[in-house]
Image: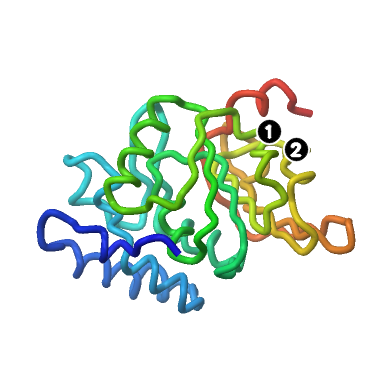
Amino acid sequence: MGRKPDEAGLAEPDKFAPARTLMVKKDLRGRGITDKSVLEVMGKVPRHLFVSGRMRARAYGDHPLPIGEGQTISQPYVVALMTELVNIKSAEKALEIGTGSGYQAAVLAGLTDQVYTVEIREGLALKAGERLEGLGYDGIKLKHADGYFGWEEHAPFDVIMVTAAANHIPPPLLKQLREGGRLIIPLGSTTYYQTLTLVTKVKGEFEVEQITGVRFVPLVGEAQESGP
């Protein structure tokens, strides 16, 4: 795997460690997250370094925060829930659609060394790339592109995580899912609320499980042009 967050050479002592520990205890384990690997990695990834300086005091509250360009970093519970549901193993390959701040990619990188992430907004992609590199997550592959089309040259993927809302599952992502693979996406209205939906590929067919209500910013680009 790539370098762990606590090996990333942070410039100052981590004064946010107690807040991160409380977040894991109260908002993750306290709300039903049980996967020990997910709890461990989220107890290490420095979430405060994925938001602007004025937002850092709020980084470990269980709520989304703005990251610029109308986008947000998801609340910790939702990050943990999505990560737990896809049940990624260390040898598996993950694709994230919607890099945003880079936080979810960093969490995935604590569980596998094969993380690919795509961001349609060039400004966010550049900032996330610099941030991840600065924190030592040099194994994450990041591309500025429309995530609707996935990342075909690196397919198939064991896990595909879509961190923006869509009113349908992009067909290219289903094609890029390996047999036995899991895809998770906030599915439904891109204006109001969605249902967190888990899709598992079994013998060439797709088994669909609806998990819970969520609210994400919309997946833009081709997703908006190709809606039902």
* Image position of 31 with respect to 95: above or below: below
- Farthest residue to the top: give it: 225
**Front position in the image: 123 or 59:** 123
**Front position in the image: 175 or 16:** 175
Residue 110 in percent (x, y) is at: 43, 64
Residue sitting at x 49%, y 73%? 33
Tag shown at residue 149:
1
Please say if the residues under marks 1 and 2 sit with CB atoms less than 8 Å apart: yes
**Front position in the image: 95 or 140:** 140
Circle 1 residues within 10 Å: few <14, some 14–19, many ≥20: some
Figure quadrant of residue 128: top left
Residue sitting at x 18%, y 51%? 57
Residue sitting at x 30%, y 61%? 5
Distance CA(mark 1)–CA(mark 2) = 5 Å
In the picture, measured across the screen, residue 164 lies left or right of residue 79, that is right
Mark 2 residue type: Pro
Tag shown at residue 172:
2
